[in-house]
Image (cartoon, grey):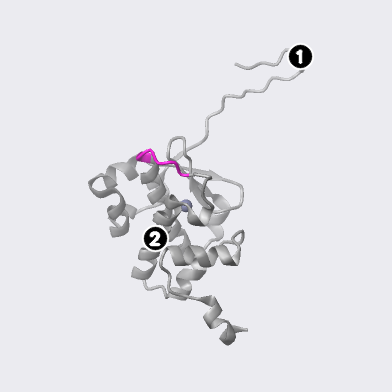
Amino acid sequence: MDVSTFLNVVIIRDVTITLHKFIDYFKGFEKVEAVKEIFGDQTEELLNHLKVEFVSRRGYMGVDEQDGHLIVSAYYLKSGSERDIYLDIIHELVHVKQCKQGQKLFDHRYDYVDRPTEIEAYRHAVKEARRIGMTEKQVYNYLRTEWMRENDLARLAKAVGVGYDPEANSNQHR
Ligand SMILES: [Zn+2]
């Protein structure tokens, strides 16, 4: 244990992160066709072993690159729309697969909206968004996050094949 000998305190530095079973909180995903497309025959086994960590910070969700567990903002889980959360899970499960394949999730040679791992995850989520009946405009707005610039959003939408152009529609709206 790391015990500082000159400061008058003891700090336990080797802590374990509290992880929960994914299937205890997200039920039925093993039956979703879009999820089966990601993991194939291994879908049930993978989801049974998948762990989720709930964090108090704002934001959405992500995947821990060390061991591929899911990280979800408890705030987002409570306040986000169910449809967005559903699509985000589909998106993150693509990252879980990428992580298992040994792909680098955070390749900083690319901007977020150009990163191949993100494009693949977004494409899959967009496909599912359409299947559940979302319009191209709704899909476009789903892609929007408050930290994304409008031109980056437009670039991402184009990269994942979302056929909505806010410029073309701007006259009608403002
Ligand atoms: Zn992502």
Residue 13: quarter of image: top right
* Image quarter of the N terminus: top right
Q: Position of residue 106 (x, y in %)?
A: 50, 44
Task: Please tell me how many numbered marks the rendered image carries.
Answer: 2
* Image quarter of the C terminus: bottom right
**Which range of residues does the magenta coloring cover?**
100-105
- Please report the residue visible at 43 percent of the width from the left and 52 percent of the height from the top: 116
What's the residue type where badge 2 is placed? Arg
43 left or right of 117? left
Q: Which mark is residue 6?
A: 1
Residue at disc 2, secondary structure: helix
What's the residue type where badge 1 is placed? Phe
Distance from Cα at disc 1 to Cα at disc 2: 54 Å
- Please report the residue visible at 47 percent of the width from the left and 59 percent of the height from the top: 85
Residue at disc 1, secondary structure: loop
Q: Is residue 102 magenta?
A: yes
Q: Report which residue position mark 2 lands on.
A: 123
Residue 132, above or below 55 = below
Q: Is residue 101 magenta?
A: yes
Q: Position of residue 4 (x, y in %)?
A: 70, 16
Q: Which mark is residue 125?
A: none
